[in-house]
Amino acid sequence: MSAARKKKTRGWSWWYLLFVIQYAVVLWPPFYNKAEPYWLGIPFFYWSQLAFVLISAALTAVVYFATDD
Amino acid sequence: MQDVNWVALSIFVLLFGFITWLGFIAAHWRKGDLDQLHEWGLGGRRFGTIVTWFLVGGDLYTAYTFIAVPALAFGAGAIAFFAVPYTILIYPILFLVFPRLWHVCHKHGYITAGDFVRGRFGNRWLALAIAVTGLVATMPYIALQLVGIQVVIGAMGISGTGFVADLPLIIAFVILAAFTYSSGLRAPASIAIVKDILIYITAFAAVIVVPIQLGGFGKIFSAVPVQKLLLAVPGPTTTGSYGVYATLALGSALALFLYPHSLTGILSASSGHAIRRNAAMLPGYSFMLGLLALIGFFAIAAGVASLPEYAIGFKQFGNNFAVPALFLHTFPSWFVGIAFAAIGIGALVPAAIMSIAAANLYTRNIHREFINKSPTDKQEAQMAKWVSLIVKLGALVFILFIPTQYAIQLQLLGGIWIIQTLPAVMLGVYTRWFNDWALLVGWAIGTVAGTTMAVVMNLTPSYPVALGGYTFPGYTAFYTLILNLLLAVVLTPVFNAMRAKKKPADETVAADYFA
């Protein structure tokens, strides 16, 4: 592990901002508390949050590959 | 009640027999000396990414969750979906905080959060507070897992009076106690793999088959009453249900990894990398939990609550009967057996891990600290094995003799209590700035205030905080955590100034927290 990389895994990384996005979206219910648009008959409230589970998993994977060796 | 469903029961018993066998032979898996506490109670810290995924998934997404979240959707509607943002919020915390905690625990041989706090802050009373909180919060949680088993046993039509009625639960409990005693954490780790596969099969089958039978998602959601479909839009002077939804999600997320059983699962991983990878992979379970929450709506649309054959079940178990009733209504008997086995086995895995975690806490932070200061490895492991039995016996007695409602209410209080350990444990991973006594006072006041607020609100999770004409209803655990943190911050300089002696030594150094 190079010194620069070591520093990356120890302290702050700008990639962590991707986590902040997850928190901001999820903790603001007005973003998703609506029925329209429906998808396969499922109200937006439900399918959008399920979709965001997948998006947040992808974002976490990005942070993993960007900050880990 | 309805007749015994023999096909379902046979499959249920068969799968239970299989995991019992698996639980016992697990003692030989990645063989270690089970007379050492870290081998018995943490599986020798040898589980790689995949096993950790099954173990932590099986640990956090409990049978009770699979019954209760859809039950809440069935009864209360949209608010139940807070479980989805909640499980989104936990993974950044897992990613950032817990690899550090894993490293320091690995380096110093810590097995519990109490061990870490003892080493970090050098205050055994603070460590005791952490350990007691963990124990008290875990007990009702174990009891609730047994409720999960009770519901599916009842749903298969097994009933009776007195001792006979409780016999299936007692048998399940004896199996659980025996394999946990003999194999330690290796037993739930191996069973978790079976359990999770069964749960995934059940969840996906339900989400595909039921909507087809009911004529599509459009029909299902149009059967849901309008006021249950979305969160109520708050009035002009309150944050209303939005605040409740967000603080429930955030507070639950902050509390989750403070539970002893979560930490036991995480510390059994073989590396910090395994934990980070799991932060990206565990959302697989969150997705399934979201699908399962929808099952509550399926149950509304299928109208199971008004079918006469399920009336007794609903009477006995309330909304918790919604999912079993829907499965009985929808699936052929053989598949009901698989689905119910998934829930039943799904209860054993977390119950085993919780009892191991509680045993580790008692052994390390109470017995070794206050009673027998220098046990041999063997004595320590033996003590933990006995305590795991006592803890489970306590949970069983609780479920058999005390109304289920109390277990649910205590579990709610447990969330408020466990979150009070956050400053010492999760912030302690980053900083030694806090004064140990300030943390203890913050913990104590947070616990008392949270308990009082919950009791005032008739043991419901949210409390309306009023400020200058506005009300902010929100999760009590979240509000009392803020109070706790404020106290710890304000009192730290005060107590530091009052301290005559040097502050107690920190066993850990900065380098212990990294690879």
Image (tube, coloured by chain):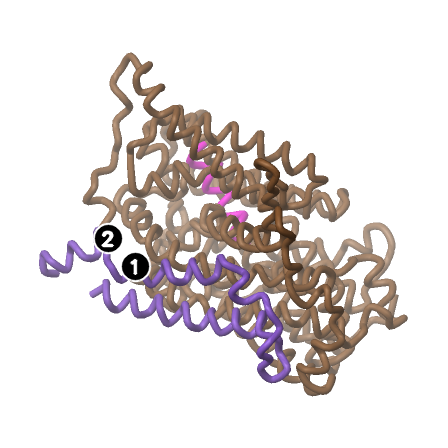
**Residue B3 pos. (x, y %):** 86, 71
Q: Is B136 situated above or below B165?
A: above
Sort mark 1 into few (<14), some (14-19) or many (20+) by Cα contacts within 10 Å. some
Residue at image mark 1: A16
Dot 2 amino acid type: Trp
Q: Which color was chain B given?
A: brown
Estimate the x, y position of residue B303 in percent, counting from the top left: 81, 74
Q: Which residue is mark 2?
A: A12
Q: Amino acid at mark 1?
A: Tyr
Badge number at residue B447: none
Looking at the rendering, the stretch of residues picked out in magenta corresponds to B352-365
Q: Residue at x 37, y 52 (%)?
A: B267
- Chain A colour as displayed: purple
The answer, for residue B367, to whether it is visible in the render is no
Could you tell me which residue is drawn at 42 percent across and 72 percent down?
A55
Q: Is residue B361 magenta?
A: yes
Q: Are marks 2 and 1 in contact (CB under 8 Å)?
A: yes
